[in-house]
Image (cartoon, rainbow, N blue to C red):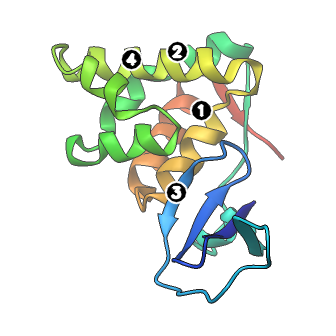
Amino acid sequence: MVELVCFRGVRAFARSHHDHRLTNQSMVSIGQLPPGSDTIQLCSIDSAAIVEDVEFPTLVAVNGEVSLRKCFEYFEEVDYNHHKRFFRHLGIVDNVIKSKDHLSYEDKIHDLLTIWVEKEGREATLNDLLRALLILNQRRTAETVKEKAVLNGHYSVER
């Protein structure tokens, strides 16, 4: 879920309930907030509704976290010009992303995904990564990663 939040009457922002960080600025100006309130929830929307209407299949790991880690190399498909936005969307801060700039692109992707998995723990799924790509309008990359994960036997499509 995503909620629109207003900070002391300035502008509304979308904030994810999952990671509690600001994700998208809206151009909505808001009037005065209730007394003693710094924020107000304007409405909640399902972030999946932001993604295209076409459903994306849910994948099931064949071997848990091992399957997820074996798919890291497929994320080298993420366009270089979009990788920072992708990792920011996953909650990786700019300083951490920048700290990996000395690595090759492939190693950078692997290290940042490792950091994300360690941060998320058991909640980390390939479906979360694919959903992030879809939200960032990287459907072709998400399709490619999904196809490789299934073709190589790391995941199956939920029926």
From mark 4 to mark 1, how far is it between C-alphas? 19 Å
Q: Residue furthest front?
A: 35
The label nearer to you, 4 versus 3, is: 3
Residues at marks 1 and 2, CA–CA distance in whole angstroms: 12 Å
Which amino acid type corresponds to the residue marked 2 in the rendered image? Lys
Left or right: residue 78 compared with residue 17: left
Checking the image for residue 110, the label placed there is 4
- Mark closest to the chain's N terminus, 3 or 1: 3
Mark identifier at residue 70:
2
The residue singled out by tag 1 in the image is 150
Q: Quadrant of the N terminus?
A: bottom right
Separation of marks 2 and 4 at Cα, in angstroms: 10 Å
At 42% from the left and 32% from the top, the residue drawn is 93
Tell me the distance, in whole angstroms, between the alpha carbons under discs 3 and 1. 30 Å
- At horizontal 61% and vertical 72% (from top left) the residue drawn is 8
In this view, 14 is above or below 85: below
Residue 115 percent across, percent down from the top left: 50, 17
Residue sitting at 63 percent across and 40 percent down?
Answer: 128
Dot 2: element: helix
Task: Using the image as rendered, state which of residue 45 and residue 64 is in the foreground.
Answer: 45
Name the kind of residue labelled 3 in the image. Answer: Thr
Residue 44 visible somewhere in the drawing: yes
